[in-house]
Image: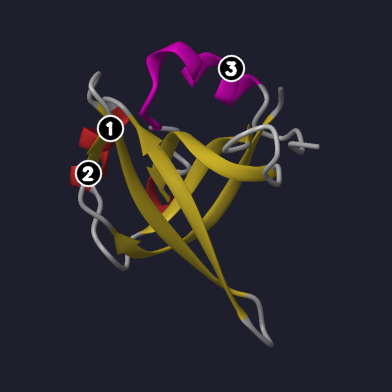
Amino acid sequence: MSNATLRGIVHLIEDTKTFGQKGFRKRLVVLEQNLGRFTNYIPLDFIGDACDSVDALSVGDDITVNYRLSGRKWQRDPQSEVKYFLSAEALSYRRSSEASAGSDVSVNDEFSQASSDDAGDAPF
């Protein structure tokens, strides 16, 4: 699985949401990219302990995010339609003013080395 990077302005930061009996935590951050004729809004998921790292962000921050794509298959029962979901999980980020200093805020220690090694690879 490859990781990729993207740059944008923080448009929205949601509160952390907790799901299930085990307390799975997820926090959505939406980045905005102005691409000339249209504006692109990119939702990124911060998972588990990474939710807390978002506290350091503010709407309007210009950031670069290392992320990985993950997909999921879901079917209610064998007779129902199969649905597929795609999400972008943030692995680390840095404010663009910090890009030259190279100070990533790691949001998942297990993947921070992989995200920096594969930052230039496309996720497909």
Using the numbered discs, state the Cα–Cα distance from disc 2 to disc 1 in whole angstroms.
7 Å
Q: Position of residue 38 (x, y in %)?
A: 64, 83
Q: Amino acid at mark 3?
A: Ala
Of residues 83 and 26, the one drawn nearer to the viewer in this rendering: 83
State yes or no: residue 106 in magenta.
yes
The numbered mark, 3 or 1, whose residue comes first in the sequence reads 1
The single residue placed furthest to the top in the displayed view is 110
The numbered mark, 2 or 1, whose residue comes first in the sequence reads 2
Of residues 47 and 113, the one drawn nearer to the viewer in this rendering: 47
Residue 16, located in which quarter of the rendered image?
top left
Residue at which label 1 appears: 25
Q: Amino acid at mark 1?
A: Arg
The residue that appears at 26% across and 43% down in the rendered structure is: 54
Range shown magenta:
104-117
Residue at which label 2 appears: 16
Question: How many C-alpha atoms fall within 10 Å of the one at disc 3: few (<14), some, or many (≥20)?
Answer: some
